[in-house]
Amino acid sequence: GRAAARLRAHHVTAGMLEVRVTYVDTRPSPERAEPGDDRPGGGSFSQRRTYPEPSDSTDELTRRARALFAQLPRRRALVKRIGLTLDALSPRAGWQRHLFGDGDAASADPARESRDDRHRALDHLLDRLRERHG
């Protein structure tokens, strides 16, 4: 949330996302190490991806980060740190609203806002609340 808000505050979008996780090494001796794990400190893993459509949407960046996190290897160890890097920044273009809604069958009103439009409005409201109340 805060990273996306900072992108919007600086009027930029992120085209590349990297998620990394660092584990705590709780093994007392090298003989208990997992095969192939010769990294000190428990190891760090990361996934990076460049997207064709840069974004500053909290919802979109969260979905992308979760998808990358799901691709990281899992270990039975304590997590020391989880990091998120947003890169390939570019100036934000204007926001094009959708003429029609999502087109789902539950929506009988064709003027209903799309999911992206609703999330854009929510992001704007949350940014204003953060500015006002911290």
Image (spheres, rainbow, N blue to C red):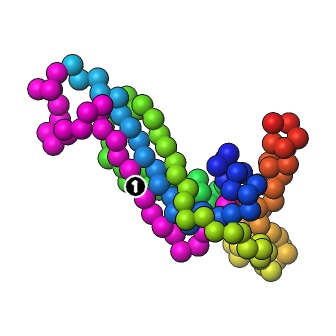
Q: Position of residue 69 (x, y in %)?
A: 44, 50
Is any part of residue 107 visible from this angle? no
Instruction: Tell me the magenta residue range.
Output: 29-57
**Extreme residue in the bottom direction:** 99
* Type of amino acid at the residue the image marks with label 1: Gln
Q: Residue at x 81, y 42 (%)?
A: 130
Residue 44 sits above or below residue 46 on the image: above
As rendered, which of 52 and 75 lies closer to the eye? 52
Q: Residue at x 80, y 80 (%)?
A: 99
Q: Position of residue 49 (x, y in %)?
A: 45, 63
Quarter placement of the C terminus: top right
As rendered, which of 133 and 118 lies closer to the eye? 133
Q: Quadrant of residue 129?
A: top right
Q: Position of residue 131 (x, y in %)?
A: 84, 44
Is any part of residue 79 visible from this angle? yes
Q: Residue at x 29, y 27 (%)?
A: 25
As rendered, which of 91 and 52 lies closer to the eye? 91
**Extreme residue in the left direction:** 31
Looking at the rendered structure, the secondary structure element under dot 1 is: strand
Q: Quadrant of residue 56?
A: bottom right
As rendered, which of 117 and 57 lies closer to the eye? 57
Q: Residue at x 65, y 56 (%)?
A: 59
Residue 60 sits above or below residue 114 on the image: above
Find disc 1 in the rendering and name its residue: 47
Q: Is residue 7 magenta?
A: no
Q: Is residue 31 magenta?
A: yes
